Amino acid sequence: MADGDRAVDNGVNVEALLGAREALTNAPEAAQFKWRAACEWKNGTHSNSTVEGFYGLGQEQQRKTKFTFDADHPEVFAAADQGATPVEYVLVGLASCLTAGIAAVAQNRNIQLRSVTATIEGDMDLYGILGIDEDVRNGFKGIKVTYNIDADAKPEDIEALVAQSQKRSAVYDIVTNPTNVTVVVN
Amino acid sequence: MSRCLADRAIDHVVLERGEVAHTWRTERWDSLRLLTPNWQSRLPGFGYTGPDPDGYRTLPEVVDFIAAYAQAISAPVRTHTTVTSVSRTETGYLVRTDQGDWSCRTAVIASGAFNIACVPGVADRVPRPVTTFSTQQYRNPDQLPVGGVLVVGASSSGTQIANEIHRSGRPVTLSVGEHIRAPRVYRGKDLEWWMDAAGVLDERYDKVDDIARARQVPSLQLAGTADRSTLDLNALTAIGVKLVGRLAGITESGKAQFGGSLRNMCALSDLKMNRLLTLIDEWAQANGLDGVVEPPHRLPPTEVEEAPPLGLDLANGEIRTIIWATGYRPDYSWLELPVFDRKGMIRHDGGVVSSQGLYLMGVPFARRRKSTLIDGAGDDARDLSDHLASYLHGEVLRTT
């Protein structure tokens, strides 16, 4: 941080992130990560997923906490509503990825955030998943994210934060571009 | 560089695989004009003296200009001499060519950054009936069959080619990735005039925050239009060009898939342009130009339709041609030295290559933002020929 700047603190350790970027630039193999989740069927459309370890920086990484996620469908789908629907997890993933990115970019650009809230909405035509119309896709027709951001910055700088966050977001990339998916049965 | 070496009485030759200005003669499309105005092509001791300083040179005029300079400085050019390898010797370098070998103590690589047109990996999947051209192969719309055209890439080349193809009656879909929008004329002056005057083009490689990133930024979406009009995405949309996102894949059945990020690509570009215009406005105010030139204004945001198409069938006959306007990379296949980074680019510090006595010119941001412009060659050549002369004289060198 340059002299005379107020101390901006969004709780993001940008020095560590920039340090990692520099270290990984010279160690491409350490930059190869594998993210994992495990899923177990419970009953009906209810499943329970867990997220714990992942691989990165050349070795298996273990977390202190095991996170669990119940997924189900709401009652209008004649289901038990034991958790969020899987497509809502996708929305959660996108919103939380973009929001984390906004905090990181703001810290890097010396912008103090006071509040960041987002609503995210995905439009879906059920004719797809119900197989009523082959021309309708299963997934979202489109996704709209709306941010309200209070920060010490000009509106165009806030817009630039949000744009840069999209540019560097993993989930945004996953959602906006095709990905090869391989499903095998043991 | 030849001129600067001659000024220092350093014996040298300039090796040219074809004729002077070979790339301009043989590897660009017919209607291309230089994207910098005539007045801006300032070479050491040479410049534009004609009646149209604000115009943009046509391709033949660019060739004439460079050839005239070679003549004016009596550059010792060996034409039709293709370098086949450069390797290290005890005293310097061995340069092998198809016209015999040279040994030298120092060498300057000025073969350019735009030798090979980049084509994305998915090009293999383009269905057979579709004809493809890179920007290096494309000459004019008459080469193309009648029918739809997908132009991939929306920087300077892609937008110019999309414009003339669409106007030839072949409907164009333009796949838009990262690009940098820029008005041709701002507040009554050429954008290049502003960037030159405000010192943006002189910004040095060792003064920018992240030089690795600055060297990868796409070039400005500027065109040397005959009427000095701005050729941006809104101008293309206005004549009926269809915008889609970045080409993300082509399925086995020949369906092109586009990223859903078009809106953000355009937002990033608009924001970046506005930051440049703000910088120009601040400079204009600080330098007493307010009231002298036209008042500041902003361009309307880039228009993106509500739901741009995410796919395009390349197999149904609607698209007959694809133009890859996806950039260029340098050809260093002849350079047999351990000077490359993991992406195959030459590691250098402001044009001073890690191998002693070897220099690099004309690549993005080599020493300055203008390093790839004709106008940037002079300052870089002066600096690097200084370094080169000191090296020949055996002085202890710092890298910059």
Image (cartoon, rainbow, N blue to C red):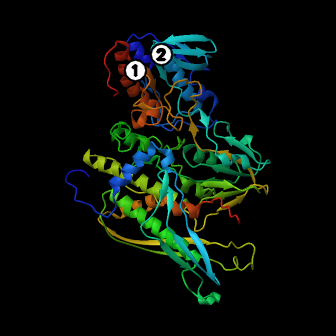
SS at badge 2: helix
Residue sitting at 42 percent across and 62 percent down? Answer: A101
Mark 2 or mark 1, earlier in chain = 1
Which amino acid lies under the numbered mark 1 shown in the image of this protein?
Gly
Left or right of B124 on screen, residue B85: left
Q: Is residue A18 visible?
A: yes
Image quadrant where residue B40 sits: top left
Residue sitting at 72 percent across and 46 percent down? Answer: B124
For the residues bearing labels 2 and 1, Cβ distance under 8 angstroms? yes
Left or right of A165 on screen, residue A46: right
**Which of the two residues, B206 or A155, is positioned nearer the viewer here?**
B206
Left or right of B208 on screen, residue B56: right
Residue sitting at 44 percent across and 58 percent down? Answer: A164
* Chain label for disc 1: B
Residue B45 is marked as 1
Residue on which the image places disc 2: B72
Where residue A30 appears, as percent x and y from the top left, is 48, 48
Which amino acid lies under the numbered mark 2 shown in the image of this protein?
Ala
